[in-house]
Amino acid sequence: MISVIVPVYNESDNIDKFIDRLDVFDDEFEVIFSVSGDDDTFEKIRDRGYNPIISIKGRGNQIINGIENSTGEIILILHADTFFKENPKEEIKSILQNYKMGCFSISFVPKQFIMKIVAFNSSNRVRQRNIAFGDQGMFFTREFYDEMGGFKNIDLMEDYDFSIRVKEKGYKIFLSKMKIYSSSRRFQKNGPFRTMWMMQKCQHMYRKGEKVDDIKQKYKWLLTRS
């Protein structure tokens, strides 16, 4: 069984489309929605036949809660604006025969030249720095998750922190050539170059040991700057 953990926050406008795209999964998958927020996302998920769980806001906490309520031997993290066009089951199982952790090559929609550059940089980050992000569909066994001490209960940088610990332990994160598709909405909202700069700034602050709350405040401040 592969447990697909989906942290969701106020996704009412997009959740139906996301659920429609879950048709690529077969009976060897279970999908665990870990929901926070104040809109009707929870009710929409439940009306589509799933049993979502309620979590305190914060992606780290939501992922932890989702994993604790899952049963699969393999864990796949899937963001609510990200999807597959084909079943990734065999690819995941094949990679985990030789590696402890893997992720997918990301492609952003809608297609834009600048987003191809962002996607290339995401793949290159895995190859050169051994760092994967959540929108790349991180996957690993439950045993490895426990070995690494799980995700931290932090509001952001939870994927970056997990990758850092994997890297420090000397494990290779395998980058699959199989595509995972993700919305470019956050890049469109704030501008691609500005978004990339903000991400690099937040990573630098985290590596320096600054508190996540301080990084959050810096992130919000950067968003409000013209």
Image (tube, helix red, strand yellow):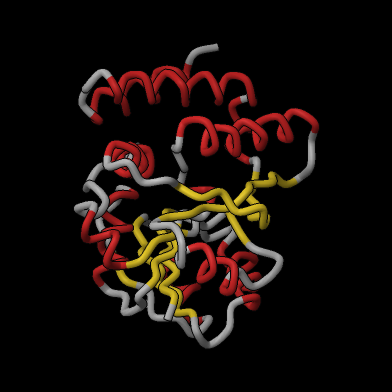
Give left or right: position of 214 versus 190.
left
Considering depth in this image, is 224 or 116 the residue closer to the camera?
116
Q: Quadrant of the C terminus?
A: top right
Give the percent coordinates (x, y) of residue 17: 65, 66
Regarding residue 37, the answer to whether it shows in the image is: yes
At a point 50% along the width and 84% down the height, the residue shown is 28
Q: Quadrant of the N terminus?
A: bottom left
Regarding residue 39, the answer to whether it shows in the image is: no
Give left or right: position of 117 versus 218.
right
Give left or right: position of 84 versus 162.
right
Considering depth in this image, is 13 or 199 the residue closer to the camera?
199
User: Residue 37's image quarter?
Assistant: bottom left
At a point 62% along the width and 20% down the height, the residue shown is 193
Give left or right: position of 134 versus 218.
right
Considering depth in this image, is 12 or 79 the residue closer to the camera?
79
User: Residue 186's image quarter?
Assistant: top right
Give the percent coordinates (x, y) of residue 174: 51, 50
User: Residue 204's image quarter?
Assistant: top left
Give the percent coordinates (x, y) of residue 173: 45, 47
At a point 41% along the width and 68% down the height, the residue shown is 33
Considering depth in this image, is 146 or 201 the residue closer to the camera?
146
Reply above or below: 25 against 99: below
Reply above or below: 204 against 18: above
Q: Residue reaching furthest bottom?
A: 27
Give the percent coordinates (x, y) of residue 81: 57, 54
Reply above or below: 183 against 82: above
Reply above or below: 115 against 22: above
Q: Residue reaching furthest top?
A: 226
